[in-house]
Image (spheres, rainbow, N blue to C red):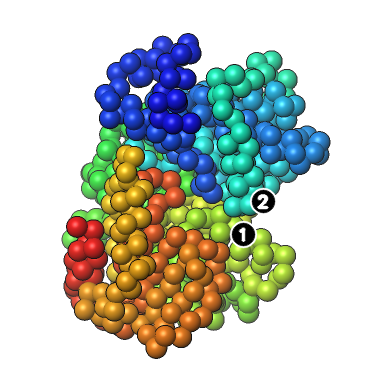
């Protein structure tokens, strides 16, 4: 329907008071943005600003997409319906209401739901899908987005986010639903089963297996002093249990950020990628003489960290740096205990650093590069388990997502939290810091630096503006970037790589709207639109023999790339 038709439909129904107030308060520009399209549902689910409108997250758009999911499950038959759907939610505004409404829409289709009674992390939801053998899963979360957002992720039966073919089928059903105000809810909850401690206990039992060297943790766990912040989200309940279960008790929790609050009052963005989100925890660490700071985002699928330097200041680590050190620790431990498989593999995204890959290569471990989105890492794990061609050892994305063991099939900040603490304790036992361990890897493998630039393109014309910028690169391929020759150009929308001599070779990844350029000195640049937000992202990766040289390369490449956006 058109913007005017969507608006008229909403104006002619009785809305809850808070949505009616939203609608009445819109400016003409806000009104147009709220109704010019339906909130997009894709391979990462849907995510949007809370409020009234078809392009907003609210009880009606949640019911609509759940109705589409229910119809898709109906089409799979009675076995799929009886297997049901696991549902969890985070600390954001309206998350409990959205989760409850989703369960009731499913129940109206006689589809069983397994619903957590209170907030739980995304990785535990992924685990619950696998543990309970459900047909699908729903996670109500906007992950690390600002307080104005909420979202809806859908998981397949493997515990990974739903694959594109299934998403297409759901979208097909979604397009058929034109009246979102008359979707049936079963308020008897006859098909809803509450799940809590039984899944918590089983998930924590698996988390206990993350510890690599239990003797080390038993000896050094109390000597490591650190600060943990759950950033007002789901991590505190399970995260603290996981740390204590592993033997880490000498930590402080940021009390102000342990309060469950969808306004996230102590941070601008509850995102461990954002150094500002760690400021309060770093202040705690300086006060308490702590060695490190760790943070999880509201749905506890991302973990960030800062570590103390020799001068008492704290260095906020990048996701790529954390991954490289964790990979080195895991593979060293396996090598020392003769448990490193000959066919070992780590899996990462095409926009992540080559740092961890170079570390892995030194152990004879390959790296599989997949499209951005942890579902592609999960799919690769499933492939390995089916074919036995490789043994999965670690998965990560540059955006602070890590997976140590695949009992969850999404990035798991609880797993990462426990392993990070162990690695920090290891360096403590050596009279070193995590920062020292990172520096040792730099000296051995080279100084890797990366940068991600996110440009916002909100509103009705945002997609067109992003497309125009990408088209500049695609239609007239740059010969140089930052003064460096482009040696290979990868266009994932065509699944092709074009070398400087004109030779074209196919790419193994599925098609996606991503461009990547490999430069003459080994540096690389990638460009892609975000899958969940109106953002265009530029990724830069460089390597040299010093941090200063690498940073200089980053600066020159950044300046050149940004000239395309003016």
Location of residue 514 with respect to 462 vertically, above or below: below
Where residue 245 appears, as percent x and y from the top left, is 54, 46
Q: Is residue 531 left or right of residue 481?
A: right
Q: Is residue 479 left or right of residue 169?
A: left
Residue positioned 43% across, 35% down in the render:
37
Residue 365 lies in quadrant: bottom right
Dot 2: element: loop
Location of residue 255 with respect to 432 vertically, above or below: above
Quadrant placement of the C terminus: bottom left
Where residue 9 appears, as percent x and y from the top left, is 47, 20
Where residue 304 appears, as percent x and y from the top left, is 37, 52
Residue positioned 54% across, 81% down in the render:
364
Between 481 and 540, the one lying in front of the other is 481
Is residue 83 among the parts visible in the rendering? no
In primary-sequence order, the first of circles 1 and 2 is 2
Between 453 and 238, the one lying in front of the other is 453
User: Any mark on residue 509, and which?
Assistant: none
Residue positioned 64% across, 48% down in the render:
166
Residue at the limit of the structure toward the bottom, as seen here? 501
The answer to whether the residue labelled 1 contacts the one labelled 2, judged by CB atoms less than 8 Å apart, is yes
Location of residue 564 with respect to 259 vertically, above or below: below
Location of residue 437 with respect to 77 vertically, above or below: below
Crowd band around label 2 with a 10 angstrom C-alpha radius: few (<14), some (14–19), many (20+): many
Residue positioned 33% across, 26% down in the render:
31
Residue 74 lies in quadrant: top right
Between 30 and 66, the one lying in front of the other is 30
Is residue 161 among the parts visible in the rendering? yes
Where residue 404 appears, as percent x and y from the top left, is 54, 59
The residues bearing labels 1 and 2 have C-alpha atoms spaced at a distance of: 9 Å
The residue tagged 1 is 379
User: Any mark on residue 158, and which?
Assistant: 2
């Amino acid at each position: 329907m058109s913007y005017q038709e969507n608006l008229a439909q909403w104006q002619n129904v009785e809305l809850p008071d808070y949505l009616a107030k939203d609608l009445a308060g819109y400016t003409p520009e806000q009104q147009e943005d709220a109704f010019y399209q339906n909130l997009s549902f894709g391979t990462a689910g849907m995510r949007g600003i809370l409020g009234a409108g078809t392009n907003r997250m609210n009880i009606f758009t949640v019911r609509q997409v759940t109705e589409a999911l229910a119809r898709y499950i109906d089409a799979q038959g009675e076995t799929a319906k009886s297997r049901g759907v696991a549902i969890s939610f985070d600390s954001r505004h309206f998350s409990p209401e959205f989760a409850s409404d989703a369960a009731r829409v499913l129940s109206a289709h006689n589809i069983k739901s397994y619903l957590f009674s209170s907030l739980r992390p995304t990785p535990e939801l992924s685990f619950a899908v696998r543990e309970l053998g459900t047909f699908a899963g729903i996670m109500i979360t906007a992950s690390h987005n600002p307080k104005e957002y909420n979202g809806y992720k859908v998981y397949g039966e493997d515990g990974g986010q739903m694959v594109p073919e299934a998403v297409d089928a759901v979208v097909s059903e979604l397009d058929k639903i034109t009246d979102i105000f008359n979707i049936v809810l079963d308020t008897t909850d006859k098909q809803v089963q509450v799940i809590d401690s039984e899944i918590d206990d089983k998930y924590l039992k698996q988390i206990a297996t993350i510890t690599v060297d239990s003797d080390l943790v038993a000896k050094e766990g109390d000597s490591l002093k650190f600060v943990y912040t759950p950033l007002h989200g789901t991590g505190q309940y399970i995260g603290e249990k996981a740390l204590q279960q592993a033997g880490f008790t000498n930590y402080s929790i940021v009390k102000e950020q342990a309060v469950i609050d969808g306004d996230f009052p102590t941070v601008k963005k509850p995102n461990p990628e954002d150094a500002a989100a760690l400021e309060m925890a770093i202040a705690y660490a300086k006060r308490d003489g702590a060695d490190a700071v760790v943070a999880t985002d509201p749905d506890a699928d991302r973990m960030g960290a800062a570590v103390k330097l020799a001068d008492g200041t704290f260095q906020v680590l990048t996701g790529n740096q954390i991954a490289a050190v964790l990979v080195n620790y895991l593979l060293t431990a396996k090598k020392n205990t003769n448990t490193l498989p000959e066919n070992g593999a780590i899996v990462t995204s095409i926009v992540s650093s080559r740092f961890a890959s170079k570390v892995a290569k030194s152990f004879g471990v390959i790296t599989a590069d997949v499209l951005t989105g942890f579902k592609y890492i999960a799919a690769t794990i499933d492939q390995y388990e089916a074919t036995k061609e490789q043994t999965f050892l670690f998965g990560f994305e540059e955006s602070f997502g890590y997976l140590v063991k695949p009992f969850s099939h999404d990035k798991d900040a609880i797993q990462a939290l426990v392993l990070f603490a162990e690695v920090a304790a290891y360096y403590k036992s050596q009279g070193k810091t995590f920062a020292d361990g990172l520096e040792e890897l730099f000296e051995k493998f080279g100084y890797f630096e990366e940068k991600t630039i996110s440009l916002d393109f909100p509103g009705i014309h945002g997609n067109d503006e992003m497309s125009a910028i990408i088209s500049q690169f695609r239609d007239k391929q740059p010969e140089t970037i930052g003064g460096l020759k482009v040696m290979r150009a990868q266009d994932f929308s065509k699944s092709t790589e074009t070398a400087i001599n004109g030779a074209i070779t196919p790419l193994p990844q599925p098609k996606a709207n991503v461009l990547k350029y490999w430069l003459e000195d080994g540096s690389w640049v990638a460009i892609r639109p975000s899958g969940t937000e109106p953002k265009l992202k530029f990724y830069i990766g460089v390597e040299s023999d010093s941090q200063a040289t690498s940073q200089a390369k980053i600066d020159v490449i950044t300046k050149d790339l940004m000239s395309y956006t003016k």
